[in-house]
Amino acid sequence: MQDPSALYRFETDTHPAAARASVLLVAVGGFVDAGRTQQLMTQHLLDTHEHTVVASFDVDQLLDYRGRRPVMTFDRDRYTSYDDPSLLLYRLVDREGTPFLLLAGVEPDYQWERVVEAVTGLIRVLGVELTLSVHGIPMAVPHTRPIGLTAHATDPRLISTYESVFGAVQVPGSLAALLELRLGESGRDAVGFSVHVPHYLGQAEFPDAALSGLGAVIAATGLALNTEDLAAMAGLNRAQLATEVASSEEVQGVVHALEQQYDAFMEGHRRPSLLATSISELPTADEIGAELEAFLADVDDTRPDGDGGPSQG
């Protein structure tokens, strides 16, 4: 493997000695980001928190330009701009002055293992103790119910308060997922949150998902992050969705069916038995035994011979 550190360079905006932080948030896309969850959350953080660039990656070594051609602007008789792709490491500051890092930009097409080694090297140099990622996944859930998420981590203790609805499943790989795997193999802490986005909103912006992802980051890190602008955006989006749903009986039917499915799942998940509404209503072993004895006694009393033994035909 070529030298991983040759993939990036430190910028003059922030001296490496002043860029140390205990938290790194990775936002480099992946095979799916339903509701543009990661994109909205990342842009919100950059818009609402003071930030500088710590390091930049040499994307010319990492991208397949013909596979996903960058956008250029042509104006009448000439090209006027080029939307050049980037992969940057930012230093941000939360509302209380605590620094944290954000790796944001395009997901590399090539040299994933080398990029992971480069990021791991930056983690060591900059004193990062916890690496996180957030993205959206499409699920058969309604937008009218609380947003769920699937948490995954390099150590179960990091996500002990979360429950998963998945078992073993194979999914397309991503750089963020590979980074989490490799960090775990080296004994470092990493956490990921996959936010459940209604499948019918997978291609649209769904700020509520980004807000939920941001809340999960806050809970995991204790950072004092701005949420007001994102919450306002989510409120407007909910109002727009309500209007659109009200205008179509077909959409109402789909949402209602998903609501019923969601409610039934949650009710079944809450109950330890289909016959009990709470754990306090479950009978004890002694009570079950007494009921069984009483049942058998009733059966014996109803037999033709009346002596409790088998009848003689």
Image: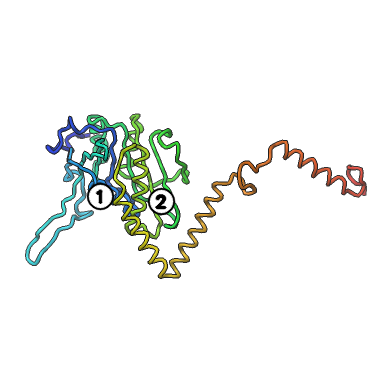
The tag on residue 196 is 2
Q: Earlier in the sequence, mark 1 or mark 2?
A: 1
Q: In which image quadrant can residue 128 be found? A: top left
The tag on residue 301 is none
Residue placed most toward the observer, 5 or 67: 5
**Would you call the spot at circle 2 few (<14 residues within 10 Å), some (14-19), or many (20 or more)?**
many
Is there CB contact under 8 Å for labels 1 and 2?
Answer: no
Residue 26 visible in the snapshot: yes
Residue at (31% x, 51% y) in the render: 230
Residue 117, image x, y percentages: 25, 34
Residue 19, image x, y percentages: 20, 33
Identify the colour scheme used.
rainbow
Indicate the secondary structure of the residue bearing disc 2.
strand
Residue at (22% x, 29% y) in the render: 125
Residue at (49% x, 58% y) in the render: 259
- Please give left or right for residue 56 compared with residue 36 in the image: left
Q: Amino acid at mark 2?
A: His
Q: Is residue 108 above or below residue 264?
A: above
Residue at (86% x, 45% y) in the render: 300
Residue 229, image x, y percentages: 29, 51
Report the Cα–Cα distance between label 1 and label 2.
Answer: 20 Å
Q: Which residue is mark 1?
A: 43
Q: In which image quadrant can residue 252 be found? A: bottom left
Image quadrant containing the N terminus:
top left
Residue 109 visible in the snapshot: no
